[in-house]
Amino acid sequence: MSLQMLSTAVVHPLVLLNISEHTTRTLAQVKRGKITAPQYMCGAVLGRQVETKFEAFLSFELKLNEASTERPEFDLEHFTARLEQLKIIFPSYDFIGWYAVSTSRQLTPGIAQLHEQIIASHASAILMVFDAALADGAAGTDGNCSLPIHVYETLAPVRVERTKLKWYGEVARAAQPGVEHFVASAVDHSIPTETTVWASRLVPVQVTLDSGEAERVAVEHVANVSRQTNSEMLNSTSGAKEVVADTSRMAVFLSGQRNALEMLAKDIAVLKTYVGDVIHGRAEFDADVVQRVQRVLSNRPVVQNNDSIFSLAMSQEETNFQLAAYLAGITDVAAAVRDVSLRANSALSYARSKHATYVSPSQGEGMFGMGGMMAGFGHGRMGRHRGFGSSFR
């Protein structure tokens, strides 16, 4: 079995949508002259890793250090801040890797230099290369694959020759397809030599797609393009309009909610005008209408300034949410520690069983069988004699 069959990467549509939106927005801003063309477009990928299965649920953009001119570098402060913010919102997701946008799905020296910085703090991070040319409909480097991404797994560092790292020594040098790609490891406990170095190999993994109910709704909303745009539908003020067949369900739902809120706002304005006219004597007092208005208002929660009860309830809800997030984090850490301990015990028991010395049954019987019984019997008799002698005296 080849190495690329050992692991799998499950990518959710939201990750692809975020990467595609990041690429489209950046290229549009560059075309309009609002920003300069970035050296690389990249971001972080969040999800879960269960043994050899990587599942990507979410992604966000990463910034590069503009002061660095020799080689690309990440803005680590921005990366740490954004990761902490998303960990509060999504406590069950962990950082599993990062993505880079390129004109092909092949590794480039610049991407390898950026990946070298990522594995310095996350040794098992995956690398997702997004082919913008293939996503735009152009012919890609591999016409057999319909997905515009290629995912690489970072293996454990091994000792290799320094010549295997020359493929990304210079940014201008192109990567050769079909060649093993190694990236220098940041951890090197051995004495450095002139010919070998510790490096991690990048191995391609199988990529599959998976989606949940919410993601399917979002994808359906983006995929359906109607003759009447969604913005025109949502900005309409003349009530419900005709809905064409290829309008997304999300746009139809939001349009209905918008129309209902508009009708509610008009009814509230009419009642407010009527109550004001009754107070000023410009309209006739109707007890039935006023009682209905009073009944509706009494059922609505009213929050006043410096409301201690509301502040206490909000504080308790925030505390409960934080405690739930902390408990989820502690549970994840405990599960990880338990998994590591089970793996360590399994490896230790296997090593002991493999390297244990052989003891023959006859030898063991002579040492621990009858011999032990005789030794115990002798000690017992001596003990009884000593006890009898002491009692006799």
Image (cartoon, rainbow, N blue to C red):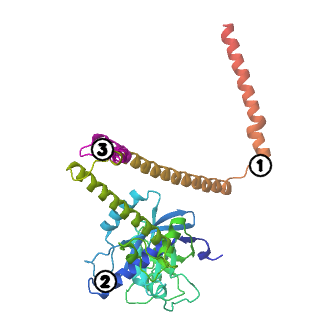
List the residue tagged with mark 1.
360
Task: Report crowding for label 2: few under 14, some 14 to 19, many 20 or more residues within 10 A (C-alpha).
Answer: few
| Residue at far bottom of view | 139
List the residue tagged with mark 2.
29
Task: Give the distance between the C-alpha atoms of the residues marked 2 and 3, in whole angstroms.
Answer: 43 Å
Residue 314, disc? none
Res. 234 image quadrant: bottom left
List the residue tagged with mark 3.
311
* Mark 2: amino acid: Gln
* Mark 1: amino acid: Ser
**Foreground: disc 1 or disc 2:** 2
Instruction: Decide: is 362 above or below 231.
Output: above
Q: Is 314 in the magenta?
A: yes
Q: Is 67 positioned to the left or the right of 371 in the image? A: left
Please tell me whether mark 3 sits on a helix, a strand or a loop: helix
Q: Can you give x and y, in whole percent of width and height, for residue 98 in the image?
A: 43, 72
Tell me which residue sits at (70%, 12%) in the image: 388
Please tell me whether mark 2 sits on a helix, a strand or a loop: helix
Q: Can you give x and y, in whole percent of width and height, for residue 5 in the image?
A: 62, 74
Tell me which residue sits at (52%, 90%) in the image: 141
* Mark 3: amino acid: Ser
